[in-house]
Image (spheres, rainbow, N blue to C red):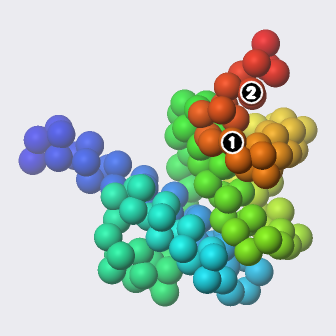
Amino acid sequence: MSLLDFHDSQQKKISKAYFVHLILVAKADGSISEKENKVLHRLGHKLGFVDEEISRMIDNPGQDSYHPPYELKERIEHLYDIIRITLADGIITHDERRITQCYAVASGFSPAESDDVIKLIEKGIAEGLDEEEIFTIYRKRKK
């Protein structure tokens, strides 16, 4: 096994743990809507999974621990995806909001910062901004 093989399998584990958490966010209100399912499949493909793997994880997500990325840009991208899942069905439940807050804090944001970044991402998604644009706005605000 080469170092490159280890990196690929390690990255796959990280992607799977992250995807499982997206599934758990989608299930926070008790079920996964059709719109949430479509978003999950889109994100699963982006992470390198095929439909069969995605469906299997949705049916039986298990409990992987969340390993946030080191880079700020990637942490904001993860939060962006999580918030997209919560917004997919048009209703953000109390549980979805609480879970999103937990992921923001687990990603290294303080509780006050997490509120701000969550609001920024929600507003950005409503305005049709992508992750890159939201990251740029966040960085400008932090200067």
Mark 2: amino acid: Ile
Give the mark toward the camera: 1 or 2. 1
Residue 9, image x, y percentages: 26, 53
| Residue at which label 2 appears | 137
Residue at the (17%, 46%) spot, across then down: 5
Residue 75 is at least partly visible in this image: no
| Residue at which label 1 appears | 129
- Above or below — where is 5 with respect to 41? above
Residue 71 is at least partly visible in this image: yes
User: Mark 1 and 2 residues: CB-CB less than 8 Å, in contact?
Assistant: yes
> Which is more N-terminal, label 2 or label 1?
1
Q: From the viewer's perspective, tell me whether residue 107 is left or right of residue 143.
A: left
Residue at the (32%, 70%) spot, across then down: 50
Residue at the (67%, 59%) spot, across then down: 84
Residue at the (72%, 22%) spot, across then down: 139
* Quadrant housing residue 13: bottom left
